[in-house]
Amino acid sequence: MFSANAVLAALRSSIRVLQWGMLAIVVAYLCSGITIVKPNEVGLIVRLGQALPTVHQAGLLFALPLPFDKVISVPGKSVQEINLDDWSASQGDMDMPTLHPIRDPYTLTGDANIIRARFVARFQVSDPFAYAFAAKDRESVYRQILYNSLTLALAQMSVDNALTTGKDLLAEQTRNMAQAKLDALGLGIHLIAFEVRNINPPSQILQAFQDVVSARVEALTFVEHANAYRASTIPDAKGRAYQIEQEAKAYADNIKAEAEGKADSFKALVTQYTLHPALLKVRLYADMLQEILPKIRISTVMPMPTTQAPIRLLLSPAKADSIESPSNVESSPTQPSPLDNDELSLPQNSDQ
Amino acid sequence: MNKSYLLRLTIGFFVLIVFFLALTGFQVPQGESAVVTNFGKPIRVINQPGFFFKWPWPFESVSLFDTRLNVFEIRISEALTRDKRNIIVPIFVLWKIVDPLKFLEALGSMENAVNKLDTLVGSAKNTLLGSYEFSQLVSIDPAEVRLDELEKKILSATASQAAVSFGIQIEQIGIKRLTLPEVNTRYVFQRMTAERAQFAARYRAEGRQKAAQITARTNTEKTLILSRANKDAEEMRGKAEAEAARIYAEAHNQSPDFYKFLRGIEVLKKSMNANTTLVIDTNSSPFDLLKRPPVLPPKT
């Protein structure tokens, strides 16, 4: 059994512990308002419901405990991103021949074509108070405004433009329009960038679009082939032209040289001729006969006294079997040739 | 003893104050408004944030209203343009409570507000869409597109009623997308496919045409180059022949008789060949030698 004194002492000491505990709780409560503001954030104090006008930078922030002060952290310096993927995600079957207006969201381009796309917007807080207190569900407000600006920009753009060269223009227009609307609503954010992640025709007709791309490539190929043909043909023709001219030049040079040579030799002969005209003529004549007679068949007719039949002499370079050929026999048609055996053949013995 | 009594008294006083404040004070947070009602009857509207007092419950109670920007999309419905084309234009509304008392009296809750706004804006949208041509909604000519104007018209058609009847300010109305009824997309796809096929055909044809032009130009140039070369060559040959003729003429002129003789000999040399048969009288030289051999003078 414990004595009454002991119980009383125990009670007293536990009350002391309790007192210290109470004090600790009070101190902890009083310090509970002290907050650390992170480097990329700024802190706002809402005192009794009302926002104080000071923007607290990163570091320790001494605020009052809870029912009095509430600290709101705003990501004042970091760049935030909004992904706009609604128009690309198709929950329906991709093989469906149609698009459902709610399940497969899309918008129309200026030429009433359908496109699917993904975008990303980056923004920074420009006014922490407006950012914190202007809108209830701020991100969905931003989204609506961005989609709205995109729709308006695309509604005046052709699909070809939007898919190719107009992408930057689209992003630029959307950014400007959305920024103006955000400013008009006083939402306190600044759009740093707006990008087109990808933009495509719907999968149902992708094939047709790809065919246009390959048609472009093919068209270029045709032209390339033609250019290649041109690149080889023109030099070839020039080469051929050069050759023709060179041949002509060679021919010209040649006949001129020949003419000169012949003229010179003629002149030399003329010199001889003036000295001994008759002699030269005889010599040339004899040379000629010497040259041509071995080549040809010659029938020589010997004029006899009228009582005698003519004797035919055949000088022929022809081969043995052609000797008896009748053409040789008939070569002197005016004179009858009763004596065949009178024929005398003198075979050609050399070519000289 | 005295000291601890004082402490207890202070603590007790504090507790009393906290209790009192909890019963009678209330905060209106930033971004909200409050309506204080006396047995359900609104007696005060507080439009700024801060700490305020009221009589404790059940005498007075407080309703808080979020006055920040709200967003909602109205129900999707098909509409007709003036040129009778079906179109679905999803629209969103950015709105906020500006008159909490009116809002409390007319609508009471957010769901109610959204339903009322949906009806109000939805019908205004469908009516106004009927006064626009399809080409005023989408067109590649930016001057023709009037979506901006349509948004503003819907806004002005609904803003005053929302403000007067519901205490709501419609800040902005925006077109979220432009969409067609599902069945129509099939035709759009057909049209787009046909359009693409046309483009593809055009590109191919243009490429072929360009290639043909290049080829034709190349061939023309080639012909030109060759014919010019041939012409030059002809000229060169002609000149050379003329020159040769001049040279011959100049030489032959020295003795035309001899030239004639020489030519004759040359012609004979060239024209006589194996097929030629010559019949010659032995009286002619030198064959006369056959008949009359040279005779040596008789020895004496």
Image (cartoon, coloured by chain):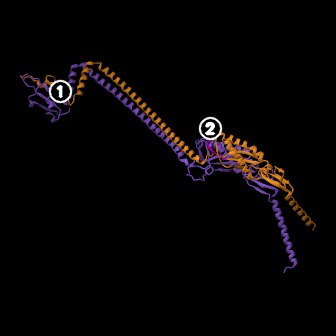
- State the residue position of label 1: B278
- Mark identifier at residue A55: none
- B279 is higher (above) or lower (below) than B212: above
Rendered hue of chain A is purple
Check if residue B87 falls in the magenta segment: yes
- B251 is higher (above) or lower (below) than B181: above
- In the orientation shown, which residue stands out farthest toward the right? B2
- State the residue position of label 2: B141
In the visual, does B294 lie left or right of A178?
Answer: left
- B109 is higher (above) or lower (below) than A15: above
Q: Quadrant of residue B279?
A: top left
* Residue stretch rendered in magenta on the structure: B84-90
Q: Nearer the viewer, residue B145 or A336?
A: B145
Task: Identify the residue at image location x=85%, y=79%.
Answer: A2
Q: Is residue A78 visible?
A: no
Residue B53 position in % (x across, y down):
86, 54
Rendered hue of chain B is orange
Circle 1/circle 2 CB separation < 8 Å: no
Q: Secondary structure at mark 2?
A: loop
Q: Tag 1: residue type?
A: Leu
Residue A176 position in % (x across, y down):
68, 42
Chain bearing tag 1 is B
Chain bearing tag 2 is B
In the visual, does B56 lie left or right of A227?
Answer: right
In the visual, does A146 lie left or right of A340?
Answer: right
Task: Mark 1 vs mark 2: give the one in front.
Answer: 2
Q: Tag 2: residue type?
A: Asp
Residue A82 position in % (x across, y down):
67, 50
Pointer 2: residues within 10 angstroms few (<14), some, or many (20+)? some
Q: Quadrant of the C terminus of chain A?
A: top left
Residue B148 position in % (x across, y down):
68, 41
Q: Nearer the viewer, residue A262 or B92?
A: B92
